[in-house]
Image (cartoon, rainbow, N blue to C red):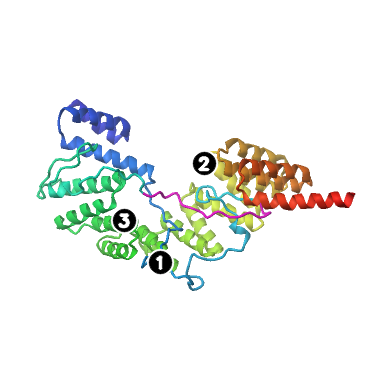
Amino acid sequence: MEIEYKILNLYKTKQFDECLNLCAIALQDKSDRMIEFIRMRAMTIQAKVVGNGYEEVEYYPQQDDLLSTAIAKTPRPGTSFQRDNKTTRDLRTAQRRTTATVRSRAGTNASCARTSRTSLHTASQMSRAATALVAGSSLTAGTPLSLRFMAKDDKLFLPAAKTLFEYVYYCEGDIRKAMEVAFQSQKADDTMDWWWNFSLARCYYALGMYRNTEDCLRQALKLNKHISIYLRLVAMYVGLNQPISALEVCKQGLSVFHEYSPLLLEQARIHDQMGNDALAVKEYRMVALEDPSNMEAIANIAMYNFYNDQPEIALRYYRRLLATNPAGPEIYNNLGLCCLYCNQWDLTLPCFRQALYFSSSPEIRSNIWFNLAHVALSTGDVTLAYRCLQVSLATDSKNEASQHALQALDARLRARRTVVK
């Protein structure tokens, strides 16, 4: 009894590594349903944390021309995410969702903002009988977990079925077998649980079957007004490139969950991707009021102020980010640019020095050196700017902005030498 108590205590206190080690020791001598259940739950929770438990919306889905859900090539204006951005607000990096890195106004090529949502790359090469819990078949030999046969009239059947579904979905990454678990369990469940419809919708969404996803989510929404259903509906409509429908779902969800931050955040992102910057910032401000520690909302408000010629206000927001979040190269880079345009020359170079200190990616270091070249040009030191651009290209030879700037600066220096001669 002592080892069972330790396992349960470690699971409750979220010490999952120690819990899994004790479970492996306990299951060597005997087969215990409770320990197997806890072990499966612990592995599922760890997989959720690694793969980002909150499944964010993907605003740049991979579309296939042969899919029936492919978006139109020429959508109506204002009803699609596909648009040509010709303003300087395109100057963002791939870490926009975390720190909204701001580059120099001198002109750069933008990288598409990607969310931190990760796909299921943990699929095991070993096949697992996903219907073992409901059909009585045994799991493949050598797999880390196994549950004993449970009859459908067992009171623990449905909780164990939900645990098995999440394990197959998150740990195994086998979507089709997870769907089979959901189908079989839904037939055995007489209570019409909304969770099974929602789980099927997640499987359909992972397979790119958006219409089936919509049907399952609408059925689940009739049974229960749950926030996860609204968020998944938003993700589905974004995948179909229907931002107007996604905004309507956000409004419906906000009528039930008033001023709920994730819904406000998705609404702001949709407005941002559609080019409605003023509406997006208004939503981001509401998110910041509801959740003052939300990094994305504060960073986007700061970036909006920066590109609207208000670097002093942007500086205040980036200082707030620096005070409430771990220090990083993006925040110091943005602080340096704000100090530059605020004419705080004594703080500009120290900020960029800290940005270089914290940077570990060649791409980020190259962008920082590009911004340092812009600082040098602002002081009139063309030679220093030329050297900074050379260091930028030496760090990352694929930096197109540095290449174009170096070519332009080289042509300018040659013209100056010609005039002198």
Q: Which numbered disc covers residue 178?
A: none
Residue at position x 85%, y 49% in the image: 417
- Residue 334 vs 23, above or below: the answer is below
Residue type for callout 2: Asn
Q: Residue furthest right?
A: 421
Q: Which numbered disc covers residue 70?
A: 1
Residue 250 placement (x, y as % from top left): 40, 63
Residue corresponding to mark 3: 202
Residue 358 placement (x, y as % from top left): 57, 37
Residue 296 placement (x, y as % from top left): 50, 50
Residue 309 placement (x, y as % from top left): 67, 57
Circle 1: is it few (<14), some (14-19), or many (20+) Cα within 10 Å?
some
Residue range corresponding to the magenta coloring: 104-119
Residue type for callout 3: Arg
Residue corresponding to mark 2: 325
- Residue 320 vs 225, above or below: the answer is above
Placement of the N terminus among the 4 image quadrants: top left
Q: Give the alpha-carbon distance from disc 1 to disc 3, as whole Å.
A: 19 Å
Q: Main secondary structure of the magenta part?
A: loop
Residue type for callout 1: Ala
Residue 355 among magenta residues: no
Residue at position x 44%, y 68% in the image: 244
Q: Give the alpha-carbon distance from disc 3 to disc 2, as whole Å.
A: 32 Å
Residue 114 among magenta residues: yes
Q: Is residue 15 visible?
A: no
Of 350 and 263, the residue lying toward us: 350
* First along the sequence among labels 1 and 2: 1
* First along the sequence among labels 1 and 3: 1
